[in-house]
Image (spheres, coloured by chain):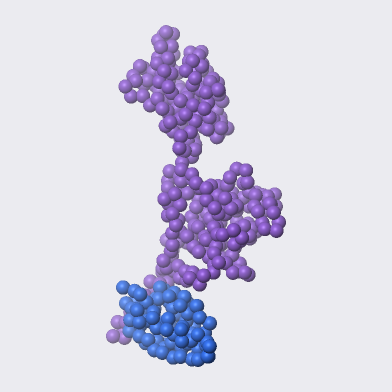
Amino acid sequence: MAEETLVKKFKVENEYGIHARPAALLVKAAGKYECDIFIEKDGNKVSCKSIMGLMTIEGYPGSTMQVTTSGGDAREAMNEIEELFVNKFFED
Amino acid sequence: MAITVKTLWDEGAEKLSLTVIAGEQYLDRKLPETAMNRPGLALTGFFQYFANQRLQIFGLAEFTYLKSLSQSEKLKRLEDLFEQQIPGVVITRNRKATKEILDLAERFKVPVLRTPMVTMDFVNECTVLLEKLTAPQERVQGTCMELMGIGVLLRGDPGIGKSETALSLIERGYSLVSDDVTEVRLTSRGNLACWANEVTRYHMEIRGLGIIHVPSLFGVAAIRRQTELDLVIDLKQPTGDEDRTGVNPEYIEIMGVRVPCITLPVRSGRDMANIVEVAALNQKLKELGHDAAKELDDKIIYRLTRGRARNG
């Protein structure tokens, strides 16, 4: 598998933003992959595999997050994370 | 669960200071109702309502009343009472059983017991004991520990490290209730009481060592006879699907009682005892009304939604 780095931006569209439950979903999804996954907002960059990191990034509803995946399975990881953002973390 | 007078005798002879004074061979009579009856009213000849399925308690009142009767009347009334197929008689305050009672006990095959206890104390103690003897009971697979007053049941597949974890917890100063097989009783208050099988009590099996006797090695502080179950911890091979926040706690049902249940992934080198200890502490905190995961989540949601208002 080729090493690659992907960058994508997502809007936080669920009602409460990235609180504990969405953070847990992101960490669980990211934890399945070998590649490095980071989430960035307003210059704050945290690992998507860290629940405490995700809870400090202030993912307000309506804010935009930049996700970077890099490594062998970067594409699969990005797809799964995109699923979560697009589906509003399966909330409501 | 129906018990016999013998069950009460076996379990309660010491605690209730009971002795059998007549009808010892009839101790296996069934005790259909696990309650007691003062037969005073029946002794006056009133049998329209008589709790004949219960243990009959002869206290000061009954004896004083019998004394007021003529000899023939006394015999007649006692005969009427014994004819009701009562399961057993207990005489309190160490009163001497009259000859009539002893004869009737033989004739109607009724065991008669005696205790020096005051009637009210006996009834109270005996009620508690009977309730204990008849409460629903189950045997569950798991090792039970008590940590700072929190009863924890460790479950998991054989070889996952239940006993090893328990051993580390004992070394940290906590107490073993049972290893691998735990008896659970549903108490009248709706709690689950856990204890160990009499035979294997306080023994543990450690792979590579075999059987050890915990109080001999670690002292009596390392054991506890019984504890109330507060938390179930399932030790599992890691799946990657473990709870990461604790915001939505899980529960399991044991005999219809909901018990918080945590699944802990076991990896080699991970100090399970430490984690079980923290889980028990956290459970204690939750019972005090302080749920760290939920409070942090609420705080974050508050900050995030306030941010929404600010950002338009």
| Residue drawn where x is 43% and y is 11% of the image | B75
Q: Is residue B71 above or below residue B28?
A: above
Image coords of residue B87 (percent x, y): 46, 25
Image coords of residue B279 (percent x, y): 52, 63
Res B46 visible: yes
Q: Quadrant of the C terminus of chain B?
A: bottom left
Image coords of residue B108 (percent x, y): 47, 18
Q: Is B139 on the left-hand or right-hand side of A65? A: right
**Chain painted purple:** B
| Residue drawn where x is 47% and y is 24% of the image | B88
Res B169 visible: no
Q: Is residue B272 above or below residue B181?
A: below
Image coords of residue B210 (percent x, y): 69, 54
Q: Is residue B280 above or below residue B211?
A: below
Q: Quadrant of the N terminus of chain B?
A: top left
Q: Is residue A64 above or below residue B168?
A: below
Q: Quadrant of residue B309?
A: bottom left
Report the number of discs: 0
| Residue drawn where x is 54% and y is 64% of the image | B236
| Residue drawn where x is 64% and y is 58% of the image | B167
Residue nearest the viewer, comparing B158 with B78: B158
Q: Colour of chain A?
A: blue
**Residue furthest front as drawn:** A1
